[in-house]
Image (spheres, grey):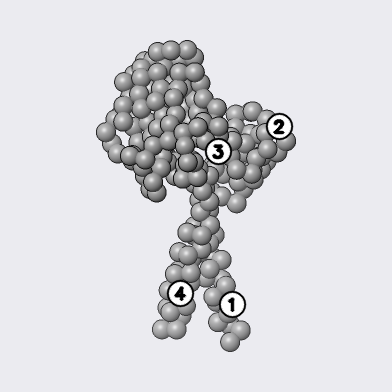
C-alpha cells in the first residue's frame, strides 16, 4: 500500500514538473500592438501579419497570417528569431526538449497551399523543414508537432536561431491562417523518472 502511495505521489509530482518545464517560444501575449508584432518578425511582401484577439487558441492574442501567393515571391514566410538566439553569433540550445508544438487555425486556403514549419540555425542555414501538407479550412485549431531529436542532431539543436512559418507549393491562392502557442516540450518519460526517483530517495532516507 505504501509503495502504491509513493508511485501516486511521484506521478503527481511529475505532472507539476511537466507543466513547469514546458517553455513558451511564442504565444503573442507580450505584444501590445501589431507594430510590435511586425518589429519581431520578417515577412515576405505578399504576406500581412496582424495581432488578433478574436481567434485565439489560448490567452487573449494570436497572430493572423493573411497571404497572397498569386503575388511575388509566390510563397509566404513569417520569420521569427527564437528567444536566446543572437543572429550570426549563436543560437538557442534546444537539446533538453523533445518536441516543438505549434497550434494553427486555417480560416481560408484558396489555393490548396501547404503549411510548412522550418527551423533555421543562427547563421541562416535550414536545419529541418516539416511539410504539414494541405490543411483544409474549417477544422478548428490543430496542433503540429516536430519530434526534434528524430530530425536534428545534438549539434544542430544547440544553435537554433529561427522558426519560419510558411505557406507554399500550392496553386498560388490566397488564404488566412492563425498561429498561437508555439512551445517546447520536454521528454515526459524523463520527468517521470526524475520525479519518481526523487520521491523514492526521500523515502529511503527516512
Q: Position of residue 126 (x, y in %)?
A: 60, 29
User: In percent of the image, x 60 and y 46: which residue is there?
Assistant: 94
Which of disc 3 and disc 4 is earlier in sequence? 4
- Mark 3 lies on residue: 151
Which of disc 1 and disc 4 is earlier in sequence? 4
Q: Position of residue 52 (x, y in %)?
A: 39, 37
The furthest residue to the left: 138
User: Does the residue at mark 2 contact the one at mark 3 (Cβ under 8 Å)?
Assistant: no
Which of disc 3 and disc 1 is earlier in sequence? 3
Closest to the observer: 46 or 111?
Answer: 46
Closest to the observer: 60 or 12?
Answer: 60
Please give left or right for residue 156 compared with residue 55 in the image: right
Please name which of the two marks, 4 or 1, marks the residue nearer to the observer: 4
Which of disc 3 and disc 2 is earlier in sequence? 2
> Marks 2 and 3, Cα distance to the nearest angstrom?
23 Å
- Mark 1 lies on residue: 201
Q: Secondary structure at mark 4?
A: helix
CA neighbours of label 1 inside 10 A, class few (<14), some (14 to 19), many (20+): few
User: Does the residue at mark 4 contact the one at mark 1 (Cβ under 8 Å)?
Assistant: no
Please give left or right for residue 171 compared with residue 78 in the image: left
CA neighbours of label 2 inside 10 A, class few (<14), some (14 to 19), many (20+): few
* Residue 113 lies in quadrant: top left
> Marks 4 and 1, Cα distance to the nearest angstrom?
13 Å
- Mark 4 lies on residue: 9
Which of disc 2 and disc 4 is earlier in sequence? 4
Q: Secondary structure at mark 2?
A: loop
Please give left or right for residue 114 compared with residue 163 in the image: left
Which of disc 1 and disc 2 is earlier in sequence? 2
- Mark 2 lies on residue: 88
Q: Secondary structure at mark 3?
A: helix
The answer, for residue 115, to whether it is visible in the render is: no
User: In percent of the image, x 56 and y 66: which residue is there?
Assistant: 194
Amino acid at each position: 500500500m505504501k509503495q502504491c502511495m509513493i508511485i501516486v505521489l511521484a506521478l503527481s509530482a511529475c505532472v507539476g514538473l511537466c507543466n513547469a518545464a514546458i517553455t513558451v517560444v511564442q504565444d503573442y501575449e507580450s505584444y501590445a500592438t501589431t507594430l510590435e508584432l511586425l518589429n519581431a518578425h520578417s515577412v515576405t511582401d505578399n504576406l500581412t501579419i496582424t495581432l488578433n484577439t478574436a481567434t485565439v487558441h489560448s490567452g487573449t492574442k494570436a497572430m493572423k497570417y493573411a497571404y497572397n501567393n498569386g503575388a511575388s515571391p509566390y510563397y509566404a514566410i513569417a520569420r521569427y528569431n527564437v528567444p536566446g538566439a543572437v543572429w550570426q553569433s549563436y543560437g538557442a540550445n534546444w537539446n533538453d526538449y523533445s518536441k516543438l508544438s505549434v497550434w494553427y487555425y486555417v480560416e481560408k486556403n484558396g489555393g490548396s497551399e501547404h503549411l510548412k514549419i522550418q527551423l533555421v540555425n543562427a547563421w541562416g542555414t535550414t536545419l529541418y523543414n516539416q511539410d504539414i501538407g494541405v490543411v483544409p479550412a474549417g477544422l478548428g485549431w490543430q496542433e503540429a508537432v516536430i519530434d526534434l531529436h528524430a530530425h536534428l542532431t545534438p549539434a544542430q539543436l544547440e544553435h537554433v536561431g529561427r522558426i519560419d512559418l510558411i505557406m507554399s507549393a500550392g496553386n498560388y491562392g490566397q488564404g488566412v491562417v492563425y498561429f498561437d502557442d508555439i512551445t517546447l516540450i520536454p521528454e515526459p518519460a524523463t520527468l517521470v523518472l526524475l520525479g519518481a526517483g526523487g520521491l523514492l530517495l526521500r523515502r529511503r532516507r527516512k
